[in-house]
Amino acid sequence: MNFEREVAPRAAARRLDRVRRLVELMGDPQDTYPVIHITGTNGKGSVARMVTALLVARGLRVGTYTSPHLERLNERMAWNGEPISDEDLGEVIGAVAELEPLLDSAPTHFEILTAAAFRWFSDVAVDVAVVEVGLGGRWDATNVADAQVAVLTNVSLDHAETIGPALTDIATEKVGIVKPGSTFVLAETSAALMPILEKSDAAETWVRGSDFRCGRNLLAHEGRVVDLYTPGAAYEGVFLPVHGSFQGDNAAVALTAVEAFFGAPLDPAVVAEAFAAVRLPGRLEVVTRHPICVLDGAHNPAGALAATQALDEAFGAVVKGRILVIGLLQGREPTEMLRCFDAGRARLVVACPPPSPRALPPAEVAAAARSLGTDTEETDSVAEAVATALALAGDQELVHVTGSLYVVGAARAALHTA
């Protein structure tokens, strides 16, 4: 018997019981407003922002809870897209801390933030909360909320040591956010996983391809033009000011989730207004033009492949070379990740440590890059890595900063203060 595999679910259930007790002591604030709950290996943060934009454009007061943050903890909790103030953040964190002596064990950092977000959303009387899962779904702290709409963007191998090891295990964990009576917006359509995903507790399941989809998906100046089809309507010629063809799929998921929430299609003018206003910091975000510098938080093989393809499509015709700035966390296989980022085609790989205790040493990343035949530089910080890359890049080269949202956050901070 694999003792750790047998014990883990029970341990996870105890952790969720602790969060349930914590929110119960606060009067179950997560039950005072409807929730749209979003999980998936990749894309859930982008979908959360798109859902928020659509709901705000529709005139609602929207609380959004996402993780991790890029530069400031406040980013994780937002009201109509505006991060919580320092004063309000301190107040709700303090309110949660006062309850810790009433618990059987101390809550984790993520559990404290989750409870604080639910409390704050209730305090400011949101009309709806858009909640992104932290990890997995079934045993995630956010799953104390019973969502009216549950969303699954996709399933691929990530955090397999925690919620795996197989894709079927990961799918089982993620579908655990679907509650009885809810609408399940299902964008993962792998035939091997459908027997698991279709057995959810949802009252209704809307599946990508048959119930909703992104049709035409064209590269445009500073973004894309897409045709989106939901169970209730067609929205053609919608402009998305973001890079990556996969964002068209994310837009279809977000629009379908909002249609499920309202139980009716949206006004096309509202949809156009909302998507035109979408901004996705750290997701193929262009921060400089000469040279082009793009920040992207891809941190697993599927995300790395998608980001690389998106960069080739958007900038392949105008750039003459590429420098890859990369930092990885422990648990990532550096050679696999570098291959997915097509590092062998880069002129230079600059390795740096993400600002995290779980940082993979830059020397290991650099060694993997050299095994692929690429020149390397090793640095002691993300700021040093970005400065090095920008100093060495030619005017027609592209600097791609990636590997972890921790890297992207540190890069944004360094560039904003430069």
Image (tube, helix red, strand yellow):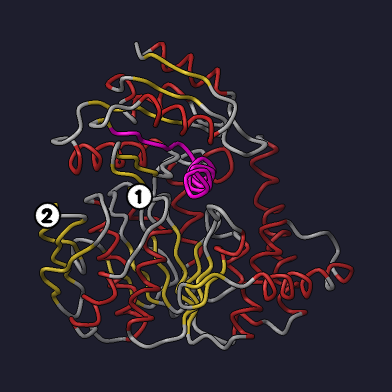
Q: Is residue 312 above or below residue 141?
A: above
Q: What amino acid is labelled 1 in the image?
A: Glu
Q: Which residue is mark 2?
A: 218
Q: Is residue 72 above or below residue 315?
A: below
* Extent of the magenta region: 398-418
Q: What amino acid is labelled 2 in the image?
A: Leu
Residue 413 lies in the magenta-colored region: yes
- Viewer-proximal residue, 402 or 55? 402
Residue 361: where, in percent of width, then height? 59, 24
Residue 412 got which mark? none
The nearer-to-camera label among 2 and 1 is: 1
Mark closest to the chain's N terminus, 2 or 1: 2
Residue 53 lies in the magenta-colored region: no
The residue shown at (29%, 79%) is 259
- Viewer-proximal residue, 274 or 334? 274
The residue shown at (38%, 35%) is 301
Q: Is residue 259 above or below residue 404?
A: below
Q: Are marks 2 and 1 in contact (CB under 8 Å)?
A: no
The residue shown at (53%, 72%) is 78
Quarter occupied by residue 97? bottom right
Element at label 1? strand
Residue 84: where, in percent of width, then height? 59, 72
Q: Which residue is mark 1?
A: 285
Residue 218: where, in percent of width, then height? 12, 54
| Image-based side of 410 in relation to 316, left or right | right
Alpha carbon of mark 2 to alpha carbon of mark 1: how far? Answer: 18 Å
Task: Please identify the dominant SS of the magenta region.
Answer: helix
Element at label 2? strand
The residue shown at (53%, 52%) is 70
Q: Residues within 10 Å of mark 1 (few under 14, many from 20)?
A: many
Quadrant (top left/top right/bottom left/bottom right) for the N terminus: top right
